[in-house]
Image (spheres, rainbow, N blue to C red):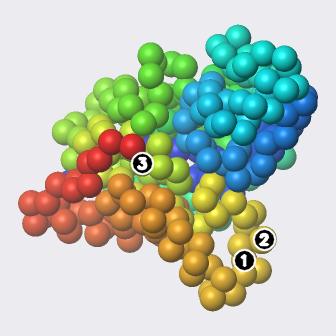
Amino acid sequence: MLKAVILDWAGTVVDHGSRAPMGAFVRAFAQFGVTVSIADARGPMGMAKRDHIAALMALPHIAAAWQSAQGTPPGDAAIDRLLAVFEPMNIAAIRDHADIIPGALEAIAWARARGLRIGSTTGYTRPIMAELMPLAAAAGYTPDHVVCAGDLPEGRPSPLMMWHAMAALGTWPAHTVVKVDDTPPGIGEGANAGTWTIGLALTGNICGLSAPELAALPESARAPIRARAESELRGADMVIDSIADLPGALEAIEVRLAKGEKPGKNVLF
């Protein structure tokens, strides 16, 4: 009954913990004399990178720090200046954070074997993806279609990238499509497009840990991380630990479809 799965990239299929963009944001702001915490840098994750920078600059303490360091309040010109520094930093960081998340290739192969198309959307720009896609392909992952931030007039949480991907894949109606993502804006784009949404609790931006770091945690330490992720991904139809758990989640959605259910938490983020 399902026809397609549309996957995010960092924190979903590659880059366990979504570490490449986080570090690049911190370093880019530092180039302008502004200290940005890891928590701040991770806050708007999932948005298009220019929108992400704008959201950070709108935070009062970062706006004040920018004013102090640069002598002018942050505006569009400042956002563009910082994006020009951030993008090559993120491209460089990609090379160290392109590992496929454990279980991803197996889960995607399972979905393909059932006839599902594999699409993708991302908050990354085309230049960043030009670095990442060949690395992912060499590791065994090539989706059927990729939509990047900047390809359309609006990014997440608008549904435009999802609708574009669905049109390119030839998949409709929306309730036959599943969006998988580790961030609220990414879940929001799926919900606003009318698709099923599956959030990822332990491999993405909310957890923020590498695969070895997560593996070293006892279950007692994972439980509060999982609970926080479930809270932040509150608009998702379901939340699972990792893309490795995707086959069971897709089967559960097909059971719900067979009962006549449709995606049930379509809320604007």
How far apart are labels 3 and 1 at the CA level?
25 Å
Q: Residue 32 carries which label?
A: none
For the C terminus, the quadrant is top left
* Residue for badge 3: 187
- What element does badge 1 sit on? helix
- What element does badge 3 sit on? helix
How far apart are labels 2 and 3 at the CA level?
26 Å
Q: Give x and y (percent) for residue 5.
A: 39, 48
Q: Are marks 2 and 1 in contact (CB under 8 Å)?
A: yes
For the N terminus, the quadrant is bottom left
**Residue at the left extreme?**
260
Horizontal side of residue 218 vs 268, given as left or right: right
Would you identify the image quadrant in which residue 44 lies? top right
Q: Residue 215 carries which label?
A: 1
Horizontal side of residue 80 vs 110, given as left or right: right
Q: Which of marks 2 and 3 is nearer the N terminus?
A: 3
Q: Which residue is drawn at 36% across and 64% down?
A: 238
Q: Taking 110 as reference, is 6 above or below it?
A: above
